[in-house]
Amino acid sequence: MNSFFIPLLMGAPQGSEGGPGGMLMSMLPFVLIIGIFYMLIIRPQRKKQSDTQKMLSALKKGDKVITIGGLHGIIQKVKESTVILKVDDNIKMEFSRSSISTVLARAPDDDDDDDKNDKSEKVEKTEEKAESTGENNKE
């Protein structure tokens, strides 16, 4: 085992000159290891951290969430760095925003109500058309 490490520690032999190509070839494995390390570990971790920050900044009243401790609740109030969760009828608890691990369900937006009204109007129009074509078929 020592016979392997001793030549590495001593460097290149005096008589041979590796030139710049030899140095590049000796550095290539280190560069590849660093590149693989970045692609497999650092980049996915940064993406996950970015997604978590987006989730935390999008918290709003009415969202159903789970804390890192496993507590389920509904957000009652959102402050700058904390949220107040309603965990039971008369029980409200204040948590740091960073303690929210998952958003189970988003609170309905006001825009969604408009979409629901549009959809219900479309359904009514479709039903009217179906009834009118059904009456024509009976005649």
Image (cartoon, rainbow, N blue to C red):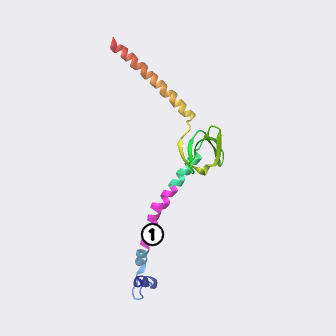
Report the quarter where the C terminus lies.
top left
> Which quadrant holds residue 75?
top right
Residue 96 in percent (x, y) is at 63, 50
Residue 58 in percent (x, y) is at 58, 44
Classify 10 Å Cα crowding around label 1: few (below 14), some (14-19), many (20 and above): few
Task: State the residue at coordinates (41%, 80%).
Answer: 19
Residue 74 in percent (x, y) is at 59, 41
Q: Nearer the viewer, residue 137 or 16?
A: 137
Task: State the residue at coordinates (42%, 76%).
Answer: 26
Q: Is residue 29 rendered to the left or right of residue 103?
A: left
Task: State the residue at coordinates (43%, 77%).
Answer: 23
Task: State the residue at coordinates (33%, 13%).
Answer: 138
Which region is colored magenta?
A: 27-46
Give the answer, above or below, for where 44 lies relative to 26: above
Give the answer, above or below, for where 82 lies relative to 33: above
Residue 35 is covered by the magenta coloring: yes
Q: Is residue 51 rendered to the left or right of residue 19?
A: right
Residue that protrudes farthest toward the bottom in the picture = 15
